[in-house]
Amino acid sequence: MLRLDPKQNPPNNNILAFSGGADSTAMAYELHRLREAFTLLHTPTGDELPGVWEHIVQTAEALDVPLVTPANHTLEHYIKEFNALPNNRQRWCTKMIKIEPCIAYLKRHKGLTLLVGLRADEPEREGLYGAYAQYRYPLREWGWDRATVLESLRKLCVTVPKRTDCACCPYQRLSEWRDLYFNHREAYEKAQAYEEMTGYTFRSPGRDKWPEDLKSLRKEFDRGRKIKGTDSFKRSLSIVTDTEESQACRVCRE
């Protein structure tokens, strides 16, 4: 695997926006099968769950393609700088940690084509990264929907992390906060410390009938309160490929 310096020109013009999720992983493997040259571009947040970075590197190595990670600050850096948390009212995390570093990279290296994992069963959208590159949507070109993506990964025996976004993403489900608490206690407690430091909460007030702050939420988890419509411990944040798709953040999870 060739690990590129962000200042170094990529060896080809195709840059694959790679979160490590099912869509971008399936797209990478299919492009490789079609013998298309490309470079993986991944923008880490510094708050990923265990296994995400390993999957990024393993994919680059398995496909023998270059990998570049543009320079950026971590989620923790911005939380401390702003003394605030990203939430549904101020969603600066994706823009500052994911999109802006990618834009800076595209500006530095003119004439690139960004390969984006937008599927055929999703609404069309304008390029998130502005007019700094050409855009291609290979999954749409091939007519691939969610089921096709998952089937392709199954045939390849390739697994992806359940989540590739931040461990303390404000858009995650209540069941994911619970799984974080029981399966990744250190990450949960770090998120709780952010809330106590800033005076803000990741969860929105009135979002549901559960406490909005993580300190109170963990008390409900400890006493065994059930979340309606979920089977609490059957799911894991480890590597799986099921048909459930989170709507938390397409940039982080696609």
Image (cartoon, rainbow, N blue to C red):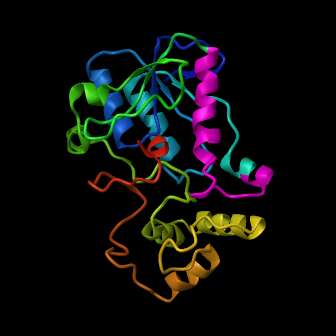
Total marks in image: 0
Residue found 46% across the figure and 70% down from its top: 174
Residue 37 belongs to the span the image colors magenta: no
Pick the front one: 57 or 96: 96
Q: Is residue 156 above or below residue 240?
A: above
In the image: residue 145, left or right of residue 230:
left
Q: Using the rendered view, name the quadrant where residue 225 is placed.
A: bottom left
Residue 168 coordinates in the image, percent (x, y): 58, 59
In the image: residue 218, left or right of residue 193:
left
Residue 99 belongs to the span the image colors magenta: yes
Pick the front one: 172 or 69: 172
Residue found 39% across the figure and 54% down from its top: 246
Name the chief secondary structure element in magenta.
Answer: helix
Q: Using the rendered view, name the quadrant where residue 74 is placed.
A: top right
In the image: residue 253, left or right of residue 95:
left
Residue 4 coordinates in the image, percent (x, y): 58, 21
Residue found 31% across the figure and 35% down from its top: 26
Image quadrant containing the C terminus: top left
Residue found 50% across the figure and 89% down from its top: 223
The region drawn magenta spans: 79-108
Residue 58 coordinates in the image, percent (x, y): 44, 36
Extreme residue toward the bottom, this view: 223
Residue 33 coordinates in the image, percent (x, y): 26, 22
Pick the front one: 61 or 121: 121
